[in-house]
Image (cartoon, rainbow, N blue to C red):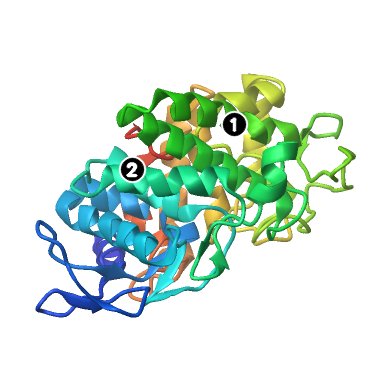
Amino acid sequence: MTKFYTAFYHARWAPSVFSDSDGQYIGFDQQVHTVSAGHAAQYTSFSGWDIYRSLIALKATLFPQETSDMAQSLVNDADQCGAIPHWVNDTVEDGVMPGDAGSLIVAGAYAFGARAFDTSGALKHMIKMANAPGTACNGVTTNGGRASYLPFGYITNGEWGQASSTLEYASSDFAISQIAGQLGNSTIQKMLLSRSAYWQNLLNASLPPPLIGARNSDGSWIAQTQSSTNNYVEGNAGQYTWMVPFNPVGPFAQLGGNTAAVSRLNAFFTVLNAGMSLPNFYMGDEPTFEVPWLYCRGYITGRVRRRARRTWSSRSWRAPSAQGRTVCPAMTTSARCRDGMRPVRPARSTCRA
């Protein structure tokens, strides 16, 4: 229980209140604003790439009004700077990490019950970010990879980690499609749901074993092995091959079906905290967060709980230091996962147990 409550405490650190006691705050436009009626605070400290995967779902489930204020804060930022920022420090879009994490945060908050914010304004920004390359927050591009992602169906340049960032954009497309559908925009829902399948363009089935790889603009494959880290953000080809959280059926089919995929998962978990050099589970960083729950796709739910508890019991979680990936704080939300439960699909209020 000490570990659980320590991690839960960490999960309350951020995002943090930015407005003063009278509701005033400095906006991204460097003007003084006042928190609008119905909201308690303006928030900052969004480490988007880290927290969209689980922290926002946890907060929206337990604290829907507070999380609604967080979502509204991002919409306010976008109104002032031009796009939903993906890494917020005070009034600055730091531009840290790739992808469109801002859309994933807002859509995820909505899916898990935080809905008291300007949803139509949020969707307007998300649609622009999904379809207009070069969209920026105060000059910092929030979707640099879209310039190649849209015409080619995968990223060739303009974004760190072109292979892994293609998966990030596919997740964003799926998330935006879900909130668009909930808000009645079926045209955008269908378009972006279809586009979320772009991850398949990078599944190199000719390799033994098949991997998510990177491609040139002429369609040719860039050479890689399971341990390749070029073209992947804080991970390698073997780790990112599993990162299609919104469509776990897809990778299983591409990897040869349930039996073959489960066998590969078993090999993946022979190392628990591999770092970026080995093509195994790396509990210390975000890209493999969802992988233990893929056993559900193989109909081996008991193994999910064993993997989750094994992670929870490992040294890097031991109190009082509770080391691990606590960036604003992403990893500590695994407090929710100690018995095998976590949100698995971006912007869908579904959990696996």
Quadrant in which the C terminus is drawn: top left
Residue 262 can be seen in this image: no
- Judge left or right: residue 278 versus residue 223: left
| Residue 173, disc | none
- Judge left or right: residue 265 versus residue 351: right
Residue 264 can be seen in this image: yes
Answer few, some or many: residues within 10 Å of disc 2's Cα (few below 14, many 20 plus, some between 14 and 19): some
> Where in the figure is residue 80, as x and y percent of width and height?
36, 66
Answer few, some or many: residues within 10 Å of disc 1's Cα (few below 14, many 20 plus, some between 14 and 19): many
**Up-down relation of residue 258 to residue 210 (above or below):** above
> Where in the figure is residue 240, as x and y percent of width and height?
65, 46
**How many numbered badges does the structure rendering display?**
2
Q: Secondary structure at mark 2?
A: loop
As shown in the figure, which amino acid type bears the numbered disc 2? Asp
| Residue 339, disc | 2
Sequence-earlier tag: 2 or 1: 1
Q: Please tell me which residue is depicted at 28% across the width and 62% down the height of the picture.
A: 73
| Residue nearest the viewer, comparing 181 with 267 | 181
Q: Which residue is mark 1?
A: 195
Quadrant in which the N terminus is drawn: bottom left
> Where in the figure is residue 150, as x and y percent of width and height?
67, 40
- Judge left or right: residue 232 versus residue 330: right
Q: Please tell me which residue is depicted at 43% across the width and 55% down the height of the picture.
A: 102
- Judge left or right: residue 68 versus residue 333: left
As shown in the figure, which amino acid type bears the numbered disc 1? Arg
Task: Please tell me in which quadrant of the rendered image residue 285 appears.
Answer: bottom right
> Where in the figure is residue 148, as x and y percent of width and height?
72, 46
Q: Nearer the viewer, mark 2 or mark 1?
A: 1
**Up-down relation of residue 330 to residue 117 (above or below):** below
